[in-house]
Image: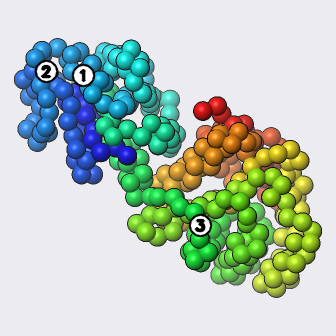
């Protein structure tokens, strides 16, 4: 976990990183040029704990900050140049962990996902942050601050743990709310929103109680369950006919009569697409609506993909939301087939394991 953020003290990316660190109660530091010199004059005194080099040459402090950190992050809007390029080259030369995020090529979500994954893998205590100065890129400070604020907040306040039976109630709340407006759920359950919500709850309560084996994790945010993810290795994703026959009546008793044939059509169609080859079957995944877009879903996906890569397994999932195709695609999933089901487009996606 990052406890200290260092930089060279220049305007723009360097100061933005310090500001976010101070907001979060992290330590700041780093080597700075003699006289605390920067583009706008002397570095303000509110940035304490800095170390001055004997030289006013910024290149000197660049090398020292790479040397004295556990990893270096460089953020830019476009190709690297000047001091940012020197920082990157210095990290390569010293064989230190380095990540360059070009925000001209990456959207905020993609950049945040990549940064979270890298930080969890490298696990630096002291992070060196670099990038253009404000005079060369007036927007870089705001971009760096926004990205670091999102990632550090999510990583600090959200933890993952194995789902326990005592958490099934909150998990059902999360999943039923998260899937309430999913196109296939709307097509299957129909009716009024209260009735639709009740039947969604019945579906997920039944799934948790009777059908989900394998790995189930919850995301905790400030102590509350706000996310859930499940996956299971083949053939655990294929319950026997005897198992289905034994547990299905409990679900059907909770549903309106007109829902049953649509639900059967849905479940049978997805079952037919389930690969015959060994794989890890993913889903459901859900985040409470008020926290969607804060990185919790990415955190859950990263945990799943890390598990796939460790086990050398192929991942498989289904989705009925077009925006989720892109979300899963950023984690390495590719669409291998699609179909129209109850008037809703469905996509079936695979992911090959990546070497560690």
313 w.r.t. 343: above or below: above
Which of these two is toward me, 122 or 109?
A: 122
What residue sits 77% from the left and 69% below the top? 211
From the image, which quarter does the C terminus lie in?
Answer: top right
The quadrant in which residue 336 appears is top right
Q: CA distance from mark 2 to mark 3?
A: 51 Å
User: SS for tag 3?
Assistant: loop
Measured from the top left, where is residue 92 in percent x and y?
41, 18
Among all residues in the image, which is located at the extreme right?
Answer: 241
User: SS for tag 2?
Assistant: loop
Measured from the top left, where is residue 307 in percent x and y?
63, 46
Q: Are marks 2 and 1 in contact (CB under 8 Å)?
A: yes
Judging by the rendered image, the residue that carries numbered circle 3 is 163
What residue sits 39% from the left and 42% below the top? 147
* Neighbours of disc 1 within 10 Å: few (<14), some (14-19), many (20+): some
Q: Is residue 283 left or right of residue 346?
A: left
Query: Residue 68: in sight, yes or no?
Result: yes
The quadrant in which residue 271 appears is bottom right
Judging by the rendered image, the residue that carries numbered circle 1 is 64
Measured from the top left, where is residue 48 in percent x and y?
12, 39
Q: Are marks 1 and 3 in contact (CB under 8 Å)?
A: no
Q: Is residue 117 left or right of residue 339?
A: left
Measured from the top left, where is residue 97 in percent x and y?
42, 27
Which of these two is toward me, 250 or 180?
A: 250
Q: CA distance from mark 2 to mark 1?
A: 9 Å
* Neighbours of disc 2 within 10 Å: few (<14), some (14-19), many (20+): some
Judging by the rendered image, the residue that carries numbered circle 2 is 53
What residue sits 71% from the left and 60% below the top? 214
59 w.r.t. 252: above or below: above
Among numbered discs 2 and 1, the one appearing first in the sequence: 2
Q: CA distance from mark 1 to mark 3?
A: 44 Å
């Amino acid at each position: 976990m990052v406890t200290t953020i260092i930089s060279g003290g220049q305007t723009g990316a360097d100061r933005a990183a310090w500001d976010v660190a101070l907001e979060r109660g992290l330590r700041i530091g780093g080597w700075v040029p003699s006289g605390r010199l920067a583009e706008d004059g002397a570095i303000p005194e509110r940035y304490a704990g800095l170390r001055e080099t004997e030289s006013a040459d910024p290149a000197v402090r660049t090398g020292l900050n790479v040397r004295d950190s556990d990893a270096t992050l460089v953020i830019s809007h476009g190709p690297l140049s000047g001091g940012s390029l020197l920082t990157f080259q210095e990290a390569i030369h010293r064989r230190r962990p380095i990540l360059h995020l070009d925000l001209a090529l990456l959207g905020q979500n993609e950049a945040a996902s990549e940064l979270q994954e890298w930080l969890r893998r490298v696990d630096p205590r002291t992070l060196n942050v670099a990038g253009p100065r404000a005079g060369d890129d007036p927007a870089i400070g705001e971009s760096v601050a926004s990205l670091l604020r999102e990632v550090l907040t999510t990583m600090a306040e959200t933890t993952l743990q194995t789902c326990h039976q005592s958490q099934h109630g909150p998990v059902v709340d999360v999943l039923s709310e998260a899937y309430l407006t999913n196109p296939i759920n709307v097509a299957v359950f129909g009716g009024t929103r209260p009735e639709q919500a009740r039947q969604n709850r019945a579906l997920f309560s039944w799934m948790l109680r009777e059908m989900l084996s394998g790995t189930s994790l919850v995301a905790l945010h400030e102590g509350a369950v706000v996310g859930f993810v499940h996956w299971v290795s083949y053939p655990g994703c294929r319950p026997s006919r005897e198992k289905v026959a034994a547990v299905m009546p409990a679900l059907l008793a909770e549903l309106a009569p007109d829902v049953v044939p649509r639900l059967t059509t849905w479940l049978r169609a997805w079952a037919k697409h389930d690969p015959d080859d060994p794989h890890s079957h993913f889903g459901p995944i859900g985040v409470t609506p008020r926290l969607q877009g804060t990185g919790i879903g990415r955190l859950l996906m990263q945990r799943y993909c890390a598990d796939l890569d460790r086990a050398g397994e192929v991942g498989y999932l289904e989705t009925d939301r077009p925006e989720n195709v892109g979300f899963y695609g950023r984690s390495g999933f590719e669409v291998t087939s699609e179909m129209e089901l109850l008037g809703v487009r469905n996509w079936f996606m695979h992911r090959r394991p990546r070497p560690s």
